[in-house]
Structure formats: C-alpha cells, structure tokens
Amino acid sequence: MCGIVGYVGNRDCTEVLMEGLSRLEYRGYDSAGIAVFEDQAIRVAKSKGRLADLQEKMKTEGVPKGHAGIGHTRWATHGEPSDRNSHPHGGGSVTIVHNGIIENYKRLKEFLLSKGIRFESDTDTEVVAQLLDYYYQKTPGNPVDAIIRTMQQLEGSYALGIIFADFPDMVFALRKESPLIVGVGENESFIASDVTAILRYTRKYFLLEPDEIAVLSRRETKIYDLHYRRIEKELKTADWDVSAAEKCGYEHFMLKEIHEQPTAVRTTITPRITEGMPDLTECGITPERLAAFRRIHVVACGTAMHAGMVGKYIIEKLAHVPVNVDIASEFRYREPLVGKGDLVIIISQSGETADSLAAMRLAKELGAETLAIVNAKGSSIAREADMLIYTHAGPEIAVASTKAYMVQIAVMYLLAFELAFAKGTITEEECRRLTALLQEVPEQIASLLEHKEMTQMIASELITADSLLYIGRGLDYALSMEGSLKLKEISYIHSESYAAGELKHGTISLITENMPVIAVATQRHLFDKTISNIKEVKARGAKVILVCHEGYTPEKDVADFCFPLPDFEDLLMPMLAVVPLQLIAYYTAVHKGTDVDKPRNLAKSVTVE
Ligand code: M6R
C-alpha cells in the first residue's frame, strides 16, 4: 500500500525521492507527490495517477530544487484518488506523508474544526498534519514534543514522514504498525517504507520499531522513544543488491520472479536440510516441539492462504495431524476455537499484512504457539511470532505473488516431512526419499521454464473469455485456487476454482462454450475421477485445457490442449503444476495489455484491514 520516501543530504532531493518512489510503485498506488525544501520554503508537487503523471506536471509547473524533502505514493482509503487528496498534506508549518489509517480521525477533525482550523482534503492524513501543527504552535521550536503529543492522540496504524518549515535541513519520521526504515549514507539520511527504495544509495539502515521517532539530518540520525529518550539501535545491512529490485532485461518483474523460482527454492530449503533430513532447529523448531501439537491452524490471506491449503493436504496426508486453513480476516473475528496445544502458522510474504498480524496476535492471546513463515526480514509478523522460518525468495516486486508462493509451499513440505517423521507416520527412509525429491524440484522447475511457448499459445486462446473455471481434486484443487487468483488479479478475467467433484452440485450450470476450463490432474489416484469430471464439462461445450503428467494423450472428448508436466512424485506436483498456471496468467495479461506488475486497485502489502 502507500509508499514513503524521505531524504536529507547533498543530492538533488527530487531525483532521490522520485527514484525511491519508483522502487515502491509495486506496492500499489493511485496518486503521488513530493514536498521539498527550496530556498528554505516547502514546495509541494502532487498528482493523481502514476509517477509519470507527476513528472509531467512538474515539467509544466517546475521541478522543486533542494536537498531535503519527503515523497509519497498513495493508495486511497479516505477520499477518492485526486490531486487534492494526494500526499503530502500540510497544516500550517508542518507537511507530512502518511502510510496507514487513522481510526479516530473524525473525532480529531471535529476537535480541530472547533478550533477554527479548515481542511482542504477528505483525508485522515490532513487531520494528522493539522494536529501536529496545532501542538507545534503550543511549543514552537520543539518538533519532537509536537510529534509525541500528536502520537498520544492517534489511534490506528501509521508511519509518517514529516518536515517542519522551521527546520529546513531535517526530516522527521515515526511509526506505529506500518513499517518504516531509516537509511544511513555518507552525509545523508533516508526514510523509506522498505529498503528497496534506497538500495541504490545505501544498504545500511535502522528498522524503526513502533512508537519510535527518527530525527534525520545530513550528519546524523537520532532515534527517540515516546518519552523523548534517545535510543541506540543496531545498524542493519540489507543483503539484497540493487539488481534484486530491477527487471534485469525481463519485460516485467512478474516474469523475472517466475524465473527466479528455482533459485528461491534452493536458497530456502538448502540451509534447512542436514544430512538428507529436514532440520528446522535454526528456526527454533525441534521434532519434539512439533510433534507435541494436537492441531494446526494455518492463517493467511490471498496467495499465502493458498500455500496453506497445499500445506493442509500434505500435513494431513503425511503426519495425520488435523489442519484448518483460515482466511485471516475471518479468523480474527469469528472467535476461533484455538488454544493451548495448538500451533498457528501464519504465512506472509510481506510480514505486514494487517489481518494476518492481528490474527497472529489473537492466536497468542488465546494461548496457541505461533510459527511465522515470512519473506520480508524484520517485518512485524517475523518479529512477533514464537517461531520463525524465513523464506529466502528475495524481494518480490510484482503485486501478483509467484516466487513467494513457491517458497512458502517448499517450507510447508519441509515442515510436513519433519512432523511426519517426528510423529512416526513416515519412516526415516521415506523422509529421506521425499527430502531428496524436494531437492530435485528446482531443476524440474527450471526445465519447465524452458518450455513457455505452449503457455503463450494457451493464453492467446483465453483473452476473449469473460470467465474461466479452474478444477481439480485434492492437491490439484488446492493448487487451482492459486492459478485462478493469478489469472483474475492480473488479466481482469473473472475466474473461480472449484473442486472437480463438486461441479455438478450447481456450478456446472455456468458451463457453455464461452467458459474455458483449466483442469489440473496430477494426482494419479484421482486421475480417472478428474477425467470423468472433465468429460462432463467438455460435453457441455467448454474448451478444456488439461495440465497433467506427460505421456497422457487426451481423447477429443477430454481436452483441447494438454500441458505435459514431468513424470515426478505426485505429492510434490503442486510445485511444478503452478508454473504453467503462473505463465498462463502472465501471458494472458500481457496479451490483454494490462499493467501486469501493478494491477488496478491492488496493493502489494495490505497494511489496512
Ligand atoms: O504479504 P502477504 O503474503 O501477507 O500478502 C497476502 C496477500 O495480500 C497476497 O498474497 C495477495 O493475494 C497477492 N497479491 C496475490 O498475488
């Protein structure tokens, strides 16, 4: 969601802000703006639309010139996307950018209105700017005091970048829930929603914790708590290089990230395998600890929840432990039956998804132990979980998740193997065999990626469809949920995933020749049953695309196209079958000319509920 960048140093501030914002575009946004100190005065430029629209506007209205300022990409929550509602927002001598939601903004606005203060936008952010100015006017010359007083009034989740007209060489920042980092360079300092925005200039950064306030100048960065006490923090070094956040010749980040999957899987699983056996001890997970749980709940959103669905099938099959999979936004409000003896697994790429974070906190309150599977280092979910397994996918920039899903399921396999062995439901020999097969997966994915042409051809057949159905049974059903989500989020074609055996209980009435069906049938023990379901849709006119093991030649009454997958272990097939589904979604979106990496209305990290 919204992105924040701030800078103070000797470089051209507008250039740094625009470059940083361009790195945050992936988070999703509908307007952008910057505020820069120019000749000691604050100059603001903002525009509805993309950064390119802001650039255009600055061409005609003039580019702010200076060495300190703040910038923002906004994903609208309060008030439509418009120039007027774009950040930065001002209040007297204060200008701010904001990520998150101020829940009590109405009450605060009424208070400020009662003091005669007038508002220019519909945003909750302007209320914060005005409140900051209100307190600043009470103690002029003491910005941190005004910040602390304001923070004491705010309810909700937020990160703020602030400049005060009286302090032209300084940038102030703070956070509560919404992430923010402080970058440290040679005679320059930065703030950013995530480290990708500043990688070009520095890899050194502080991770701001909730209720911490950063005061940045050219020479130094000071961090305070809410009692105005100085805090010493560990300076971290980002282990990603700039290329991790660049397209490197690929047309889109999504395609690049699909191709990064073999490496991502290898980097994620290799350190967790010792002498041929899964080994999660570095993550605080011992076989004994795992085996003691009576039940597992997986709680997540979107693609991460789909990874949990695959996890459910494999854990139940191998370890015989019941697994519930919950959508985090449902789990947190339905008084879940979770407690002591339960393990709650939270899966999240960003580690900042508001619903997943809240669900994890609830699970802890209820007495369950929590295990986070997270990609973003140092994120809130990673920090608060009892146990943590980092996925090592590197930064995922495309809004549509691909490599993060792949490594999430890779971790679910490791967990399932370890748990099953610990429970004695598989032998050591079987555990070793499955672990060895998991290590072969990267190579298998790489060879699949060499045969993209067929997915391009299938995609060209789908672009005229208004609606699609994905069907499968068992693991194939779990997987088809992800295939369907990928297609709809980037190609804007409606699609649903359905358990193949459930179709004739209602949904089959939708089938016509205008509704293509993508059928996944990789589970040999279910193959004939799925083929029967496919015949049912084919008989009703649907065009069928079948994804199954190589060597099967479908009759005319089964499928129009068949995408062959390597002959591999059924249990691990989701890691292979997802690749053509990702590519079909990708090429369909490309054929349709949509904004593949930044699909409309979507944000990469959903930090509001
Ligand atoms: O960062 P998270 O993994 O917690 O995000 C969860 C979902 O918002 C995310 O997977 C979303 O569904 C993706 N856009 C799907 O491609």
Image (cartoon, rainbow, N blue to C red):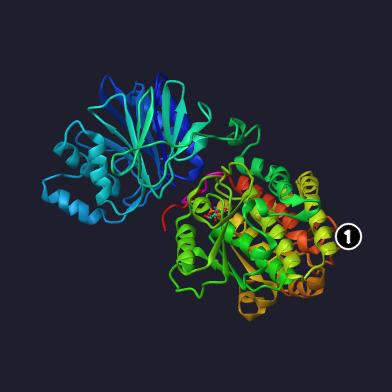
Q: Is mark 1 on a helix, strand or loop?
A: loop
Where is 203 relative to 366, above or below? above
User: Where does the image place residue 13, in percent across and percent down from the top left?
Assistant: 39, 24
Q: Is 598 within the magenta? A: yes
Q: In this view, does 26 lie to the left or right of 405?
A: left
Is residue 476 or residue 156 the one in the foreground? Answer: 156
State which quadrant residue 548 falls in: bottom right
Location of mark 1 (residue): 551
Residue 512 seen by the camera: no
Q: Is residue 162 magenta?
A: no
Residue 574 visible here: yes
Is most of the magenta stretch helix, strand or loop?
A: loop
Label 1 neighbour load within 10 Å: few <14, some 14-19, many 20+: few
The image shows residue 492 at horizontal and vertical percentages of 55, 54
Ligand 1 is within 8 Å of the C-beta of the residue at disc 1: no
Q: What residue type is labelled 1?
A: Gly
**Residue nearest the viewer, comparing 330 with 386:** 386
Residue for point 61% across, 79% down: 506
Residue nearest the viewer, comparing 441 with 367: 367
Observer-nearest residue: 129 or 487? Answer: 129
Quadrant location of the C terminus?
bottom left
The correct choice, above or below, for 255 with respect to 297 in the image is: above
Q: What stretch is highlighted in magenta?
A: 597-602
Which residue is most to the bottom? 505
The number of numbered discs placed on residues in the rendered structure image is 1
| Ligand 1, image quadrant it occupies | bottom right
- Name the residue rendered at 80%, 63% in the picture: 570
Residue 476, quarter of the rendered image: bottom right
**Left/right of residue 284 with respect to residue 569 in the rendered view:** left
